[in-house]
Every structure is written in C-alpha cells, then in structure tokens.
Image: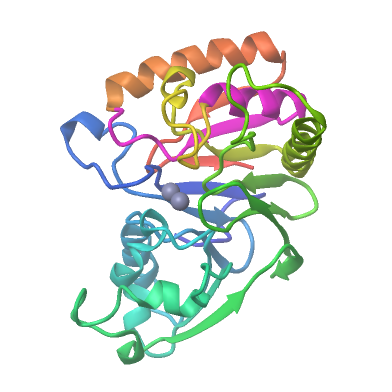
Amino acid sequence: MSPTSGKGLKAKFYGVRGSIPCPGQATSVYGGNTSCVQILGGPEIIVLDGGTGIRELGLELIRQRKALRVHLLLTHTHWDHIQGFPFFSPIYFPGNEIIVYGPRALEKSLEEALMVQMQYAYFPVRGVELAAKIRFMELDEETFKIGDIEFTTKSMNHPIRVLAYRFTDGHSTGVYTGDNEPYYDVLDTKGAKSDTSSQRRREFIKECNDRVAEFIRGCHLLIADSQYTDEEYESKRGWGHSSIGYVLDVAARSEVKKVVLFHHEPTHDDKVLARIEKQAVARARSLSKSMRVTMAREGRTYPV
Ligand SMILES: [Zn+2]
Ligand SMILES: [Zn+2]
C-alpha cells in the first residue's frame, strides 16, 4: 500500500470508535478499534490520531520494508486517541522517524502525555528504548505544511485541549474535528432570569460556535465526532462529544459536501449504527439537497 496510490486526497479509516475499543461479532461491520485515520494522496505518510486502529496501519507500513517517516497528528491525548501508539510497529525499527504533532495536555508536555503509557508500570518497553527516532511538535492554532498538504488547526470544545485539523492539497479539503461538543452555557438553567451577563455569555457562546462553523465551511469531507443520538445527548451534556443532529445541522449550514459520522459510541453495535445511519441520511436530505452523509466504517477509504 503506497500513500501515493490513486489521484487526490483520500481518508482511510483504521479505527472509528470513541472511548474504548469494542471488538466482537456485534461490531464487525462498522469496527471496534478506536480513532485512527490515514490521509492518502500526498508523498508523506500522514496519520490522524493513534487509537487502537493504528496497530493494523503499522503492520501494513512495515511490510514496505523501507525506512519510514510518519507524521502522526494527534487531536489530543485522551486514551482512545493514543492507546495504539505502543503497538505501532514502525516505532521499533531503527532508521524510521515518527514526528508526533498535537497540543499540550494541561500541565504535561505533548511528549510526557503520550509517553506516560510507556513506563514499566504500564508497558514492558519504555519510550527511551524505542529504536525509531521520535520527534514532538507542539501545536497551537496555526497553519503548516506537510509535503504538499496544508494543515490548519483550531481549538475545539472538550474537557482537555483538542485541536481539529483542516487539510487541503489545493483541490480538495477535509476537516477532522477530533472530540468536540458544541459550546453551551453551563450557567443556563431552566427558569433562570435573562440579564445582561447571561446575554453576554450567550453572545460569546454563539461566537465560539460560529468559529467552528467557519472552520468547516465548504469542506469536501468532514470527519466529525458524532458519538450520540440527539436523545442520548440530553443526558451526556458536558461529556465533550456531539450529537448527530448538531453535526448535520452545522455541516448543512456550512455547505459541507460530505459528512462522515465518526467516534462511534461503544454501546452502539452494528444494528444500532445501521438504524442511526439510515435516520442520518434522511435528516441530511431534509437539510440540504447536495450534502451526503455516511457512518465511518473501519477499513473503508473515502475520497476527500
Ligand atoms: Zn475520544
Ligand atoms: Zn477525548
């Protein structure tokens, strides 16, 4: 498998779950591995997030039997986005270079937050023993290039700093949100009086949500955290994830061409996801004539 195979950018899904892997017969259609997506179509090997799906990608890469340079772009260092890293085979071969990008994690550097899982208390190999050269690039909101693909980052709403990635080769554009919940007013309780301060808060929250809508505007492929149904979201507010209804609404308003629903709730088996996907397709049709929507499946590749 070569990253340059075929024309144009593509996204290949190695892990589509949120929170925790859930392998088994009941999840074999959509997949049970946690977040990992490869961007194909440029000269460089580019990977979004290092959930358990990255293990399979690592095995494919080392079959190329040549020195590898891998750009691993992390949205954040929550477990389900990094837990595949110790099993990513290219890190054990000398001559390979892994460049890890991502935000700082609260009081920890990106390196400390990723490598804490490679200590003897948790894993038999320590980070300092890895044969490949590992470099870390801490990111803020910024624009940079990897090969001929330009990336722009944007902070999202989650209990820890998350960076979304917008990427383009000049022809097509994709956005990968990472974990994200729409901004809302935590002080807004039913029956509370509307005063100047609550009005100001509302305006600020609207601005924050508008910035997210702008960030995804007009993209060809939006890979979005849409962990919950609208009904489930009501009891999961503040957990840091989006409902499918929110994702489709903001995508339609922002004239997104295609939405890939991603970071599936681990309790949703194939039957549940198939039902939700059907509902999502109908809802997308009612919101926009041209916007398409699909549920991410492990092993699938989608053009950007
Ligand atoms: Zn997650
Ligand atoms: Zn998270």
**Relative image position of residue 179 (x, y in whole percent):** 52, 46
Vertical relation: 283 (above or below) 151? above
How are the colours assigned in the image?
rainbow
Q: In which quarter of the image is residue 223?
A: top right
Viewed as shown, does residue 11 lie left or right of 19?
right
Magenta residue check for 257? yes
Viewed as shown, does residue 196 lie left or right of 113?
right
Magenta extent: 244-268
Viewed as shown, does residue 215 lie left or right of 187?
right
**Relative image position of residue 295 (x, y in whole percent):** 46, 29
Decide if residue 69 is in sight here.
Answer: no
Vertical relation: 148 (above or below) 237? below
Nearer to the camera, 66 or 69: 69
Decide if residue 129 is in sight here.
Answer: yes
For the C terminus, the image quarter is top right
Vertical relation: 186 (above or below) 65? above
**Relative image position of residue 108 (x, y in whole percent):** 49, 75
Picture mark count: 0
For the N terminus, the image quarter is bottom left
Magenta residue check for 252? yes
Q: Which residue is drawn at 80% across and 53% down?
A: 170
**Relative image position of residue 104 (x, y in whole percent):** 56, 70
Q: Which residue is drawn at 74% across and 68% down?
A: 144
Nearer to the camera, 100 or 13: 100
